[in-house]
Amino acid sequence: MTTEEKCLKLIELLKYNQRQAAEVLGIATQTVDKKMKHTNNNKFTEDDVQKFLNYIDLLQAEAHKL
């Protein structure tokens, strides 16, 4: 699975829209849109995948505190 596919799958699994994905990645919504559409060679990076995985870990930690 490519880095692109991983990011898109994580966004899909979280059921996030572009704004929510942008918040997790710390980038502009417009940039997420360009990455999703591969505009101007914009692509998701391994760093983006790691940010999503760290975010999911954070969500799990918060859920376990309940």
Image (tube, rainbow, N blue to C red):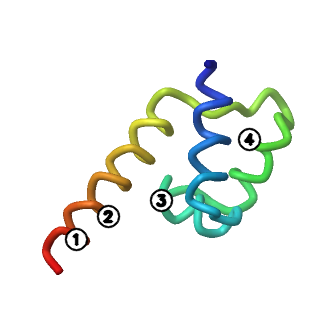
Residue 62 tag number:
1
Q: Which residue is mark 3?
A: 24
> Which secondary structure, mark 3?
helix
User: Considering the image in quadrants, where does the N terminus appear?
Assistant: top right
Circle 1/circle 2 CB separation < 8 Å: yes
Q: Closest to the observer: 52 or 30? A: 52
Q: Is residue 63 above or below residue 5?
A: below
Real-space Cα separation, disc 4 to disc 2, in angstroms: 24 Å
Give the Cα distance between marks 1 and 4. Answer: 29 Å
Query: Which residue is farthest top?
Result: 1
Amino acid type at circle 3 is Val
- Mark 1 / mark 4, whichever is N-terminal: 4
Which amino acid, by three-letter code, is at mark 4? Lys
Tag 4 secondary structure? helix
Instruction: Provide the secondary structure element on which disc 1 rests.
Output: helix
Marks 1/2: CA–CA distance: 5 Å
Residue 14 versus residue 44: which sits nearer the camera? 14
Number of marks present in the image shown: 4
Q: Amino acid at mark 2?
A: Leu
- Please tell me which of labels 1 and 3 falls first in the chain: 3
Q: Which residue, given by chain and number where applicable, does mark 4 sit on? A: 35
Q: Decide which of tag 3 and tag 4 comes sooner along the chain.
A: 3
Q: Are marks 3 and 2 in contact (CB under 8 Å)?
A: no
The amino acid type, in three-letter code, at marker 1 is Glu
